[in-house]
Image (spheres, rainbow, N blue to C red):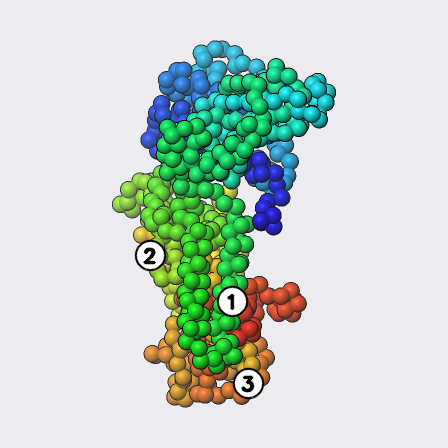
Amino acid sequence: MDDFSSERDPLLDVFIFETNQLLEQLEDIMLEVEKDDTISEEHINEIFRIMHTIKGSASMMSYDSVAVVAHKIEDLFFKIRENKSVGSEFSNVCDVVFEGGDFIKGQMEKIQNGEEAAGTADSLIQRITDLLAKMSGTDEPPKNEIQLEDKPESAPKQEDYAPKAESGKNKFAITIFFDDECKMENVRAFSVVNSIEKYCSEILSKPKELFDNPTCNEVIQKEGFALFIATDLNQQKVEEIVKKQMCVKSVEVKEDDFTLHSKEADNDNNNKAKGVAESGKANTATSTKVASKQSLINVNVDKLDALMDFVGEIVITGSMLEHNPLIKGIELPVLHKNIDRLQKLTKELQDVVMSVRMVPIASVFHKMNRIVRDMSKELNKEVELSISGEETEVDKTVVDNLSDPLMHLVRNCMDHGLESAEDRIKAGKPAKGTVSLKAMNIGSNVIVTVSDDGRGLDKDKIIKKAIEKKLIASDETDISDKKIYSLILAPGFSTKEQVTKFSGRGVGMDVVKQNIESINGGISIDSEPGKGTITKIKIPLTLSIIEGMNVAVGDLSFILPITSIQESFRPKAKDIVTDPYGNEMILIRGKCCNVVRLHEKYGIDTEVKNLEEGILITVENNNKLVCLFVDRIIGDQQIVIKSLPKYLSDMLEEDCGIAGCTILGDGGIGFIINTNEL
């Protein structure tokens, strides 16, 4: 499993993960506090706990800038807890907490990217210091001197004690309990082991697995962290080293025969993983209860990606086995029955792995609360964010790629769409505007809708700007509403006369379109003057394995995503027309649709060149239809999307319409068509 593990220190990975989770909790709490316009005692205690934990963890990891900011906010809420009230400083308190959370978040991003977290927040610290002075009723703010009392002292040097143990003549059993509110007990335990092991010839811990054991933290909370060591240090020195570690509440060191506990402790580690305590039947019952509560574990995304790759290879191998002509020619019912069973089990395995990768879209939706909050203040607009369908699940990769497009769309609703309170009242609307986010499953896709109840899009203004940008001809008047609205997705397009902090540069909607298409999605826009704008995003549930239609063009195979196909048919001569520019079109129920001959587009030799002899497949994306001309349809199958080899991708043009490739059942290569680019 080494291939899938992160190169970073596992302790650092845990620190980043835990801190980001705490920051999300902090932001949710503060948004709720601002919405209710009051802060409860429960909220005060929770924010204090979050900041205390972040401060302690950052201090232990030597990220002083993070620790200092967390420490000051902790001081602020300690004072608020003492006063039982925020008083007239409610707005200022909310602002500094949000700003402090943003600073820590920025530092965490640097750490995650391998950069130095060297930023400072002097002005923020001073503002918090001034707030503390006001709440304390003092005339002069206290000096900005911050002592991180929870930061562990520098580790004792080895020469301060005995040299590294050779004989391990002294054997001790150590039981350690950590502060009740410290959290991340496994990280604290790891720090203790790290500090003492260099003085030991042998060392054994209970629990043994500190990072892969889902019940580890709960076991340490209830029973303490146990160490059995063989060392040349005396009892006093051992106790001194352990006590210097952060968040240690109590330490008990006693002489103990190391060998008597070695096997017992090792067996106990296996029991701990199941939530079973070591000492007696009573403890067993308690630990079993603990295990029943713990049903979730955190898994590195790289491991899930690798697992998905393996499943993809199994799908390909199973398909090759099923379609192998040698096996098909063998009349052996048992063999074919087992192959069918293998295919069924592979499909079930694939479904399970895909379900593991699925995460609720709520994680992205809730991030928009902060954007709405900040922009409401900047633009002086009252806005409510309405969220529905947040439980809808999508592949983790899709969710990660959806955050930026949603952010741009919500900003557009706030800046372009919603009117000021005065204008809304004049138009007979409530002063508070609404931005809505909605998600729902439709087949193998998810539809995400972003809408507002604002002024709507100005078609005349869009057309005028499009003519200026030469996106349409000046005499092009017969344009559908959907085509007009889709013009705002063009690069550099903006109807804002002046560049502001949020818009006017013409890059937002272009980025939205690119990001959505990069995950094989589509976007459409509709609007009604005076009533608002609706943007719909259609995205696939997963990007790795899709249902595809295998079609033949000459000697090559192409794959069309099933979700893009509307219909397939053999055309009749009377329905085929040619426009004045020589472009072929086909009449489908009274509407003209462009025809793309794949053999001409990719320069493929084929004997099927007459439209009436081949097959036309109608595909749709972004409300646009196109008919693809192919020789014949081979059939539908599950395909595993793979990147094109470098030598092929270098040869092909950037917008050639090829999204990747797959290995077919007969071992051949099939090229996956990107219908967005056609």
Q: Which residue is mark 2?
A: 528
Q: Which residue is mark 3?
A: 606
The amino acid marked with disc number 2 is Glu
- Where residue 383 sits, quadrant-wise, is top left
User: In the image shown, does 635 or 574 lie closer to the viewer?
Assistant: 635
Q: Alpha-carbon distance for marks 1 and 2?
A: 48 Å
Percent x, y for residue 306?
54, 54
- Where residue 645 sits, quadrant-wise, is bottom right
Q: Alpha-carbon distance for marks 3 and 1?
A: 28 Å
Instruction: Kindly report which numbered mark, 2 or 3, lies closer to the viewer in this rendering.
Output: 3
Percent x, y for residue 510?
51, 56
Mark sitting earlier along the chain (1/2): 1
Is residue 59 visible from the viewing direction of this image?
A: no
Q: Is residue 446 above or below residue 338?
A: above
Q: Alpha-carbon distance for marks 2 and 3?
A: 49 Å
Q: CB atoms at circles 2 and 3 under 8 Å apart?
A: no
The amino acid marked with disc number 3 is Thr
Please tell me which residue is depicted at 57% across the width and 63% down the height of the picture: 643
Please tell me which residue is depicted at 73% across the width and 20% down the height of the picture: 159
Please tell me which residue is depicted at 40% across the width and 24% down the height of the picture: 45
Instruction: Kindly report which numbered mark, 3 or 1, lies closer to the viewer in this rendering.
Output: 1
**Residue 316: numbered disc:** 1
Label 3: state its secondary structure: loop
Q: Is residue 365 above or below residue 537?
A: above
**Residue 39: numbered disc:** none
Mark sitting earlier along the chain (2/3): 2
Label 2: state its secondary structure: strand
Is residue 294 visible from the viewing direction of this image?
A: yes
